[in-house]
Image (tube, rainbow, N blue to C red):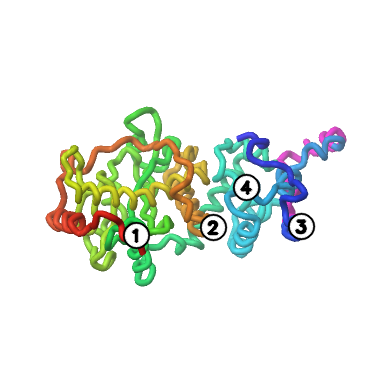
Amino acid sequence: MALESCIAFLLADELDAEEYTHFQTSLKTQGIGSIHPHRNEDDDEDDDNEDDEDDEGKKSYFSATVPSLSVLDFQKCFQLTQPQVEELVNLLSPCDWATRKFDGWTVTHAVLASLWTLSTLESYSGVAARFRTSESLVRFQLNDFCCLITKNFSDQIRWPKWKEAEASVSGFLTDVGLPGTVCVLGSCSVPIDRPADVPDPEVYRNSCGNTYSVTLLAFCNHQGCFTFVSAEYPGSWHNSRVLLETEIGKAIREDPLNLLHGKHVIGDVTFPLSEHLLTPFPDYGMLGEKKLRYNLRVQAALHVVRGSLNSLRSRFQRLRCLQMSSVGQSALAVRTCCILYNMYVETDNATSAQSLEEQAEVQLPFHELPHGHSGSLGGISKRQDIAASLGRKTKKR
C-alpha cells in the first residue's frame, strides 16, 4: 500500500495541540527515529560523507511521518488510537522482549512496526524498508509481539459465563428476537504459505487451486466480541470437522450443560443441528411462515459474527494474506488480531464494516455430507418449538 494513500501530513486544525505535544514527547523518550538498517562496520566509514547531505531525506518512518499523522490517519495506519498505543506500550514494556537486544529498537518501535505489519498487505521487505531495519527483524519481531499479546492478554477472549452469558442471551433476544442464544458461530479462510511445521502440508491445500489456508472458526457474543477463536486446522476441512476438533466443539458434544447451562449457540447449515447448536431450516422453497421467520432471525444473528469477521479482516489486512509458512505462527497472528479487536476496536459498527469477498470455499450443508444427518431429535424438536413460539413481529424492548 503506497504511503500517500494511507497517511497525510498534519494540518494545524486536525490535532489537539496538547495531545500532539504529549505524543511527540512520548515518541522521543522512546528513542523514535534512532533505528537504522543493520549494516557492516566497514560500510559505515564509506557511507559517512556521501550520506550527510541526504540525512533529511532519509529519516525513518518513525521520525519523518508518525509524529505528523492526524488522529484519524494514525488510527487508519495502526488500527489503534495514539492513547491506545501508549497504553499497549506501557502494558508490554515489562515483558521479556527478545528484540530488546537490538540497539535502538524500543518497545514503541516493536509495537508500531508490528501493528503496521498486521494492518497492511505491504510486503515484509517493504515494511523493513519503511522502518529502516531488516526483513528478518520484522518477521522475528512480529512473532515476538504475537507471543506476548497472546500470553499476557489471553483473557480478552473468553467464553461468557454468569452475568456475561445472561447479557448476551438478553442481547440476542432484544436485537434479533431469538431466545436462549449465548453465542453465534462463523468461519472464514485465512490464506498462508505452504506450511513447514506440520507432518502433511498438503492437507492445508485448498481444492480450488494451488493455495494453502487455515480456517478461522469464531464464536461471538451479541456485541460482536470474540468469545472463542481457533485458527490451526486446515482450510480444506469442512466446518463441521473443524468444530469437532476444537475445545468448544468437544464441550458442546460432551459437556453441554456445564458450557451452556441449558442455552444454545447458533450456526449456519454447515454445522450439525443439535439441542445445543441450532441451525436454519433447510430451504427448498417449501417452508411455512413460521420456519421462514425463524430462518430470518437466525440469519440476523449470524450477521453479527460475519460482520465481526469482515471487520477483523478489513482492519487487520494481513489476515487476507498472512505469508507465513508456519501453522503455529499463523494461529498466533490470528489470535493476536482477535485479542486486539476485543481490547481496542469498537465492535458496535462491526456489522456495517466493508464487506470482503469471502475467501472460503462454498461448503455443503452438513446434512448433505455422506456422513451427515438431519440433526439430533433434541435439536429438531427445539428448533421447531422456537419457530412455533416466534411472533409475526419482533418485540420491541
Q: Position of residue 120 (x, y in %)?
A: 56, 41
Who comes first in sequence, dot 3 or dot 4?
A: 3
Q: Secondary structure at mark 4?
A: helix
Q: Is residue 300 magenta?
A: no
* Closer mark to the observer between disc 2 and disc 4: 2
Query: Where residue 227 is drawn, which disc sits there?
Result: none
Pointer 3: what residue?
A: 17
| Residue 302 x, y percent position in the rendering | 34, 50
The first of marks 2 and 4 along the sequence is 4
Give the side of residue 31 with respect to residue 149, left or right: right
| Circle 1 crowding by C-alpha within 10 Å: few under 14, some 14–19, many from 20 | many
The numbered mark at residue 344 is: 2
Give the image quarter of residue 330.
top left
Badge 1 vs badge 4, beta-carbon distance below 8 Å = no
Determine the image quadrant of residue 258.
bottom left
Relative to residue 323, is residue 292 drawn left or right? left
Given contact means CB atoms under 8 Å apart, are the residues at marks 1 and 3 in contact? no
